[in-house]
Structure formats: structure tokens, C-alpha cells
Image (cartoon, rainbow, N blue to C red):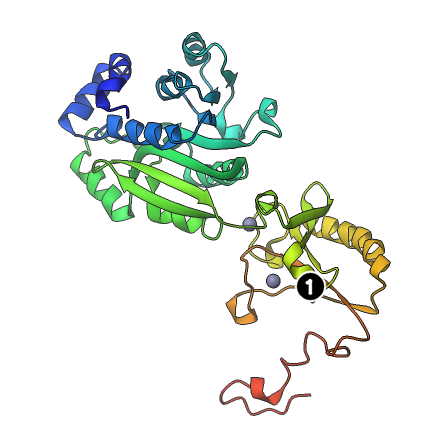
Amino acid sequence: MLGKQGFNEWAAEYDNTVRESERQGTYPFAGYSDVLTEIFEAVDEKQQASILDIGFGTGALASALYNKGHRIFGIDFSSEMIERARKKMPEAQLVEWDMADGLPPAFDGLFFDCIVSTYALHHLEDADKWKLLKQLLKRLAPGGTLLIGDIAFRTTEDRQACRNEYENVWDGDEAYVVFDELETALSNIAKCEFKAHSHCGAVIQLRPECPFCHPVYDLEQRIVFETANCWFLQHGKAQGVLEGSGVIVPKQHRSSPFELTPHEWQETQELLGLVKPFLEKIAPDGYTLGWNVGEASNQSIGHSHLHVIPRFNDEPYAGKGLRHWLKKPENRRPGQGREER
Ligand SMILES: [Zn+2]
Ligand SMILES: [Zn+2]
């Protein structure tokens, strides 16, 4: 285990402001070493992990991990930082790139065991942060984790309290994460955990949660057809009773079809055009196509998915469709008197 002692090198690198702020436990850098130490230890539990560092700065955290045998990838928008970091990590893949633009083409097709970012994300406005985090979550390898260490608060009240206490030195240009807001922005997409290391420093851990954002994680999920923005998926477990059934989903997380973009609609149609001849091999007598939206309709996965279900004349429920049981009298809402048609 590498304790605080092991991070002397960091101490040698921060400027005096950081050091003083941390030593006195004041905004903005209270808890700094603890934040970096926790992330270092969490990542170092993995063996020879591939690690992407977003905004690595001088490369202090990344080079500590590099020296433990992990494979380091990183972006930073400062060429000076890249030069300094490169000296410490000659084998690392470091790219000069602005995180506001997502990830560089050099990293296309790569997945990472851990993605880390320390004291960098507060340079992005909230909307841009959530957008970047959603992109990064898609680049985690199975079992992967995204770890953020930064000035951050659990609630808006906590942030306001810190702001009031330090109003003379508070940096209004920086956008510090409020965990409650992050959790809302990533609901259904990632499991989020918050661990405070001081009144203004925290580690936030994100793990992907949505199976349709990450079909490759599930060995039974088969990507049958793919367009630029959508997939047609068949799950092994669904093939027993509902032979041939599958779902068309957008690759980006959309909670329902009401949120699909024109491209996604168009590609949903394209995929239907590929799926039908494909399913014709099992000679269905008909199809049931449809979306459930919201809990009331029993939408079990909060990522828009069009069910494509081949139907057969010899099914016990042949002749019964989507509305069959919904329109039964037992499904009448309390106090709703009208006869159904
Ligand atoms: Zn999703
Ligand atoms: Zn469903």
C-alpha cells in the first residue's frame, strides 16, 4: 500500500498555494493528497490495467500508476504538461487534446479498465461534464470504473456553504460538481458513489448500469445488426419462448422513443429493413412490434428499445396482440365508467 509518504513527489510539484491550502484544510485543495491516494489505490487493485487519465496535468497520478506497471493513456490540452509527463512516462500514449471535445481519434476503439480525472473536470460547465462522462462511461471495459477526484460537494447547500465561507477567494469561473445533480444526470446510466475527503474535496466513482448502453458486456447479448447510431440485439435468454425476438436500440442512452433523434428514427427503420428478411428464415406468421415507456407500462430497462417479436399461428396466444389484455374490463381504472370499445 502506498501511503501519503509515497506521494512526496506530488508535494514537490504543487505550487505553494496548493500546498498551503491543503495543509490548512481550506478551500480549494483541502483533502488533495487523500483524494489522489484513494484513486491511486483503487486503480492499483487491478493488475496491469489500461488507464485513461483525463487532464493529467504534470502526470503525478498517472506516472505513479505507470511505475506500478499499468498502461497509461491520457489527454491534456497543455503541450507543456504533455512534455513534462512524457519524460516520466516514455511508453505512455499521451495526446494533446481538449476534453471539451470528448476523446481524440487516436483512442477510437479503445476500452479502458479505469478512467480517472483529478482536479480537471471543474473546467467544464455542468452540461458539458455530463456529456463527457456519458461518453467516457461508454469507453470502459467490462468491470471498468470511472473515478473523479475534484473539488466537489454532495448538495447545492454544501456548495453554497463553502462559497459563503470562502467568498473572498471563491473562483466563480470553475464549475464544481454537486453530486446530487450528477446522480440525476446519470440516472439509469451509472451507479454513482460519493466519498468526501474534506469539506470541499471528494472522490466520485461511476460504474455503468445500463445493459443497452453496453451490450458487449453481456456475453449472451448478440449484436446482430449495427448502423452508425443503433443496434439490433438478440439476447440468448429471450430465444426460448420468443424465438427470433430482439430489440432495436439507439447506441446513445435515450430513456424512451420520445427522445430519439431524426437519425436514430431513420436507422431504426433501416434496421427493421434488415431484420425482417433475417427473421423470415424462421417463417413467422406475423409480428408484434412495440415500445413500453415508463413504469406503468412495465418498461424494465430505462433505455428506449423497440421490441421486435415474431408471432406464429401455432402459439397458444396466437391471435392476441398488444392491446388484448390491456383492454379487458379488469384493467379499468377506478372510477372510470365508460364502456370500452
Ligand atoms: Zn442506456
Ligand atoms: Zn422491454
Of residues 206 and 23, which is closer to you in this image? 206
Q: Residue at x 53, y 65 (%)?
A: 294
The answer to whether any part of residue 22 appears in the image is yes
The answer to whether any part of residue 173 appears in the image is no
Which residue lies under the disc numbered 1?
A: 240
Q: Quadrant of the N terminus?
A: top left
How many callouts does the rendering have?
Answer: 1
Image coords of residue 122 (percent x, y) = 37, 32
Say left or right for 185 vs 255.
left
Say left or right for 165 vs 252.
left
Of residues 195 and 2, which is closer to you in this image? 2
Residue density around tag 1, few if under 14, some if 14–19, many if 20 or more, within 10 Å: few
For residue 235, what is the image quadrant?
bottom right
- Establish if 328 lies above or below 113: below
Image coords of residue 289 (percent x, y) = 72, 65
Callout 1 secondary element: loop
Q: Residue at x 47, y 9 (%)?
A: 90
- Establish if 172 lies above or below 208: above
Image coords of residue 233 (percent x, y) = 68, 51
Q: Residue at x 59, y 50 (%)?
A: 212
What amino acid does circle 1 point to?
A: Gly
Say left or right for 12 vs 238.
left
For residue 259, what is the image quadrant?
bottom right
Question: Ligand 2 closer than 8 Å to the CB at disc 1?
Answer: no
Image coords of residue 317 (percent x, y) = 73, 78
- Establish if 262 lies above or below 205: below
Q: Quadrant of the C terminus?
A: bottom right
Q: Residue at x 30, y 38 (%)?
A: 152
